[in-house]
Amino acid sequence: MSLDNKVAIVTGASRGVGRATALALAENGSAVVINGTNIQILEELAEEIETMGSESMIQAGDVTVPQTAKEVVESTINRFNKIDILVNNAGINRRSSTLDMTLEEWDEVLNVNLNANLYFSKAVLPHMINQNAGKIINVSSTAGKAVHRNAAPSYGTAKAGVNYLTMHLAMEGAPHNILVNGVCPGPIETDMSKQWSEEYHEQILQKIPLKRLGKPEDVANTILFLASEKSDFITGETININGGSFMN
């Protein structure tokens, strides 16, 4: 799935799915603009990308600030003259009941998981419309499709919003050859899953028909497919990546 001469932006690229996605895109030829808040980790990732023979550019910043999206996009255009792919990956999770959750936590989760997707999509759309081409991939979750005891209401609400935003952007982008899709991971091996107790880990495995957690690369490979020309007749979809734990 060649991405030669393509330019991609990946938010939340410091670790997990974002890092794996940046590496997958770079391995297949794309220049990658990586966003996050930890400069040291981003520098290490940029070095790894460049050892693959692809270009990288670090654009650190808080995705919940609308100006960050504008600055990342402007810097990308100034250096590469175009943007072919946007991966809205930045996200956080909080685990609490409705009564235990504070309004500050509600706002925080929606700002990172939903509002940031809008900020970056709005920032890239004029450039993609101008070039009459583009791919936007939103990282959502199966929590946006089915209630989940292990997620705060803010998380599921934000991800459901991402799923709708994906469809709406796909509808608006279609006349301009802009394809917008999402991926909905289930349980994935990340820093967060390493904190689970052995008992909880086993409970999760019992709910997965394939009997294993996903890896960041499992999600990244699907994003790679959606970013490539192999998916050029797919738009407005949210693809489940969860070993069969949620099917629709």
Image (spheres, rainbow, N blue to C red):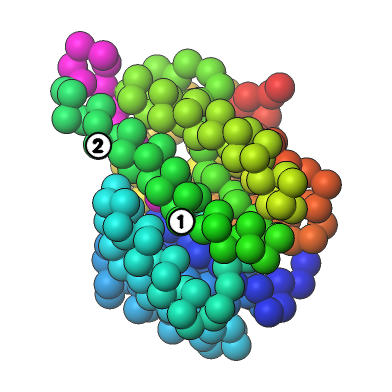
Which x, y percent locates residue 195?
32, 42
In front of the other: 54 or 131? 131
Q: Is residue 38 above or below residue 30?
A: above
In front of the other: 69 or 4? 69
Determine crowd level at label 1: few under 14, some 14-19, many 20+ residues with C-alpha closer than 10 A. many
Residue closest to the far top:
99
> Residue 92 magenta-drawn?
yes
- Image mark for residue 55: none
- Image mark for residue 108: 2
- Image quarter where the N terminus lies is bottom right
Amino acid type at mark 2: Glu
In front of the other: 147 or 117? 117
Q: Which residues are magenta?
A: 90-101
- Dot 1 or dot 2: first in sequence order is 2
Which x, y percent locates residue 45?
42, 74
In front of the other: 208 or 16? 16
In percent of the image, x 54 and y 80: which residue is there? 80
Q: Nearer the viewer, mark 1 or mark 2?
A: 1
Which x, y percent locates residue 118?
44, 43
In percent of the image, x 41 and y 37: which residue is there? 114
Q: Are marks 1 and 2 in contact (CB under 8 Å)?
A: no
Q: CA distance from mark 1 to mark 2?
A: 21 Å
> Residue 211 magenta-drawn?
no
Q: Is residue 41 above or below residue 68?
A: below
- Image mark for residue 123: 1
Determine whether the residue tagged by mark 2 lies in a helix, strand or loop: helix
Determine whether the residue tagged by mark 1 lies in a helix, strand or loop: helix
In percent of the image, x 54 and y 34: which residue is there? 165
- Image quarter where the C terminus lies is top right
Q: Main secondary structure of the magenta part?
A: loop
Determine crowd level at label 2: few under 14, some 14-19, many 20+ residues with C-alpha closer than 10 A. some
The answer, for residue 45, to whether it is visible in the render is no
